[in-house]
Image (cartoon, helix red, strand yellow):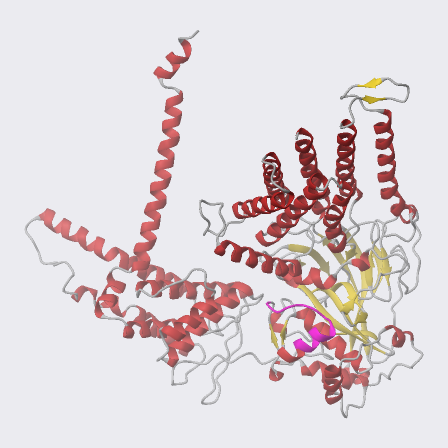
Amino acid sequence: MISHWNLGLVAAAATLLSAAPLSTIFDRWTWLIQSTIAVAVVAAVAALARLGRVPLWGQVLAMLGGLLLALTWLFPSGAELLGVVPTPATIGHFGALAEASLVDMRSYGVKVPDTDPMLFLAVLGIGAVAVLVDLSAVGLRRPALAGLPMLAVYSVPVAVYVDSVPPVPFIIGAAGYLWLLVTDNIDRVRQFGRRFTGDGRGVDGWEASPLASAGRRLAAVGVAVAVLLPLAMPGMTGGLLDTLSSGTGEGTGGSGRGTAGQVDLFSALQGQLNQSEVTDLVKVTTNEPSPFYLRFGAADTLRSGGFRPRPPSGPPVNREFSPAVPDREGITRTRHQATVEVTENFDMPLLPVYAEPVQIDLNGRWSYDTNQQVLFSNQERSPGKRYEFEYVRSTYSPTALRQARPLPAEHSLRQLLTTPTVSTVETLVDELIEGKPTEYDKVRAIYDHFTADNGFRYALSTEGGTSGQEIVDFLTNKVGFCQQYAAAMAWLVRAADIPARVAFGFTTGAKSDGGTYVLTNRNLHAWTEVYFDGFGWVPFDATPAYGVQGATRSTWAPDLEVEEEVVPEPSATAGPAGSGSETNQNQLEEGLEEELSGLSSDPSAPTRTATPWLWGAVGALALLVLLTAPALQRSALRRRRRGRRVPSATSAGTTTGETSSGDHPMVVLADTDRARADAHAAWDELLDTLVDFRQRIDGAETPRATASRLARDTFHTDSEATSAVRLLGRAEELARYARDPHPGEPLLPALRRVRAALVTGSNRRTRLVATALPPSVLLRWRVAVDDASARLVSSYGRFRAAARRWSPRRLLAERLPR
């Protein structure tokens, strides 16, 4: 029984050691702490089951039950019994975490932050491995079989890590497996009695036998060979011979230099765009007045599973590069200089650079692929790099691009840029390019298809992917973000027998006072590049400009939705731009204050008649202030929120003019932060209004769900109020989740209409309470009082504990025994 205890503990420790490669996936060590707790519970339950001589199948059930209890305690749903006993709600919560982990795997790149779904998946997997290892090593006494589940843990980082897994985690996992094998063999040998050496000398229990020493030496040699042999192979990524070699081959093939090409650019892009926090990635300074996109990758290999990047190949950067296409009529080239500084948050074997660099000043082992226009390295990473380069900016005229001829059949790009056959795509392309005489006209016909007039919209909440079926789904649903627009256009252009690829990089970004462009994860972008014979790779950005921060358009690929959305005026009369907006604001202010204006005539208000008693007057005044304080605070809060109104076109700095009768002035808001703050203020005001009129609020609902519920249950008979509440919900949803909230929405009139509908649908008592004693203000006061009380009690407890330390009675009690 003691041997089983020992072997069970070693099996648990070996399981945790085998999970060491997961450290290359997670950003922090929370997964290890939680996994240790789960494995400890499994090992303890297994030991107790063996102590009670439970059969093997009972031991397995006990370990699974222990794992379930550990998961329940680590990831509670709030509906457990005594905090650890799972309920059906707990199982449903686990299912929701498992589904959410699939979303997180598509959203995040390595290293993964500590999210509950990903931690749950890791702890569940390691706990299941602990059960299998204990069953194989202790229950079945076949420790060699335990290597299979331990190997499954190691295969996870091997499959998802963008680079090869470091050797140290492999060594740790291998050491755990060897420890398990050695412990099992020592236990088997001890069953035969006293151990002896070859010359007949007895060996104590603590002393290693010559056979065991030889086994450890063989194990160490085996692990060393397993680690060093792949590194020494010249065809392996990051190999030892590759590290010692300083030369870099040229050409377009992928001859083993595939470290940079192994980056999943699509997953990295989607993961960064889905991040809730804004992170600075790159800072660039250039003397070009209006620079184009800064690029760092390209995906030009198309298979049925979608676009994939090829391993880049090219010469070192310490040389000059000539433009890929010579000068010709219709191409305007200007030469500029740029300085790029990469932050620690942008970690790739790729560096961003403007297209067509001619000279790069960069220290280190970096190379440039002139075909893919990618700056890459197989030995270094991008964080902390600062470099300068000169580049050529090429602009093209549509007239010149129409002179481009189709590529000859023997051209190298014909064989390289092939397209899998998808019947739906082929049919759509045939319809779009019908009657188009030139290559450029065909590309423009495809480019013009991705417009709002054809139903296309921008959204980050859609599923990513560039396979044939996913492209068909996008063309059908017509909702997606940049990588889907770029991949779909590239696929359609290739179906038209024209070479195209997907490029990755940054949009222009925000320019600081010093002239430096600060590029964040919100500026990450993907676009399409089309190859025209005699012109080279020409960029086309089919993604709607309103969904991309810093989007840039060109004369050959213009913005097809240049007209901003017209904001309707709720007033029936037309007036000068700006005056109507101010009139509506004044009307809203009057509407929001109409109850407070008649407060003094309320019969329940205290009497203000003169009294000869001074203290009575003071008391009445104090009572009046106390009664009106909630209404005054509610009014002040409403006024502050009205200060965050959406400015008119004149105040926003845009040009607006008088339009014909029936048209409305255009409202454009350039400051997205102001638009987001306006939407949040309007939504907060709506929630407080709902609280004041005793409407149910569910904190777990999204803005869209709340608006839909109110439109369905509360305002179903009022179409105007329904539209208004849906407008407020949509504005808050865009402000929370969209990169650029839609500006110029008439939120204040919508608030007025919702409040009017609530006033109409409420009884007199509810209206009076909402005006004089707003429940939203009283709720805030109650929370503030509770917080203050908790802080006071905590401070008193700390003071009392400190006072006890210096109590004379305690000091005397401590000195008396001396």
Left or right for 666, reference 388: left
- Please tell me which residue is depicted at 73% across the width and 87% down the height of the picture: 432
Residue 511 visible to the viewer:
no
Number of marks drawn:
0
Q: Position of residue 371 (x, y in %)?
A: 86, 67
In what quadrant of the picture does the N terminus appear?
A: top right
Q: Quadrant of the rendered structure where residue 389 is? A: bottom right
Q: In this view, does 135 lie above or below 635?
A: above
- Please tell me which residue is depicted at 18% across the width and 52% down the height of the picture: 623
Q: Position of residue 334 (x, y in %)?
A: 80, 69
Foreground pick, 572 / 223:
223
Q: Where is residue 47 in the image (x, y as percent from the top left)?
A: 62, 36
Foreground pick, 263 / 668:
263
Q: Where is residue 818 in the image (x, y as percent from the top left)?
A: 44, 6
Left or right for 575, reference 289: left
Left or right for 697, reference 495: left
Q: Is residue 52 above or below residue 406?
A: above
Residue stretch in magenta: 461-474
Q: In this view, does 436 lie above or below 480?
A: below
Q: Quadrant of the rendered structure where residue 606 is? A: bottom left
Residue 278 visible to the viewer:
yes
Q: Is 462 inside the magenta-drawn segment?
A: yes
Q: Quadrant of the rendered structure where residue 766 is? A: bottom left
